[in-house]
Amino acid sequence: MQRLNISSGAPWEAKVGYSRAVRIGNVVEVSGTVSQDGDKVIGINDPYEQTKHALAKIEAALVKAGASLHDVIRTRIYVTDISQWEKIGRAHGEFFQAIRPATTMVEVSKLISPELLVEIEATAIVPSSKA
């Protein structure tokens, strides 16, 4: 099967050796995605805004891979403060209310930068008609 690596253009992708998303066959895996553009964190101190921005970046990566949010079957949400779950969940629901993928939300001690509050991964399976 052919492998398609999707880049977001972030300089650390080459340094760390990863892709924003990878598609093999009808499966698309999206790497952990945070609310950062270049050196700027979007939504400082706002887990709702960070979640929305990360999910928009995930959606863009899916489109580049020939998929959409409707193809997402699982999300994994890593948060630095689980007490903010309702704000994070509300943003997730705005993207996935009708789709309802399986999801996990767990608290972690920290992410790569102290300003980052949320990191999200996604798995999508593209229907054969779109593959």
Image (tube, grey):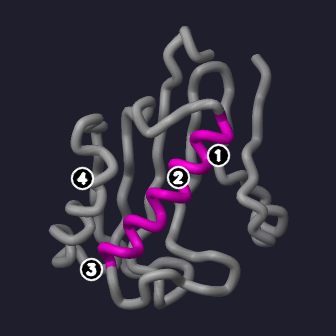
The image shows residue 84 at horizontal and vertical percentages of: 20, 76
Q: Which residue is mark 3?
A: 81
Mark 1: which secondary structure?
Answer: strand
Mark 1 to mark 4 CA distance (whole Å):
22 Å
Q: Amino acid at mark 4?
A: Gly
Q: Amino acid at mark 2?
A: Ile
Any mark on residue 60, and which? none
Any mark on residue 58, and which? 2
* Quadrant of the image occupied by residue 67: top right
Q: Which residue is mark 4?
A: 93
The image shows residue 59 at horizontal and vertical percentages of: 51, 48
Decide which of tag 3 and tag 1 comes sooner along the chain: 1
Q: Main secondary structure of the magenta part?
A: helix
Decide which of tag 3 and tag 4 comes sooner along the chain: 3
* Quadrant of the image occupied by residue 6: top right
Any mark on residue 21, and which? 1
Mark 2: which secondary structure?
Answer: helix
Q: Is residue 71 above or below residue 34?
A: above
Residues 65 and 16: in front is: 65
Name the residue at 67% across, 41% down: 64
Mark 3 to mark 4 CA distance (whole Å):
18 Å
| Residue span colored magenta | 47-65
| Crowding at mark 4 (Cα within 10 Å: few <14, some 14-19, many 20+) | some
Q: Amino acid at mark 3?
A: Asp
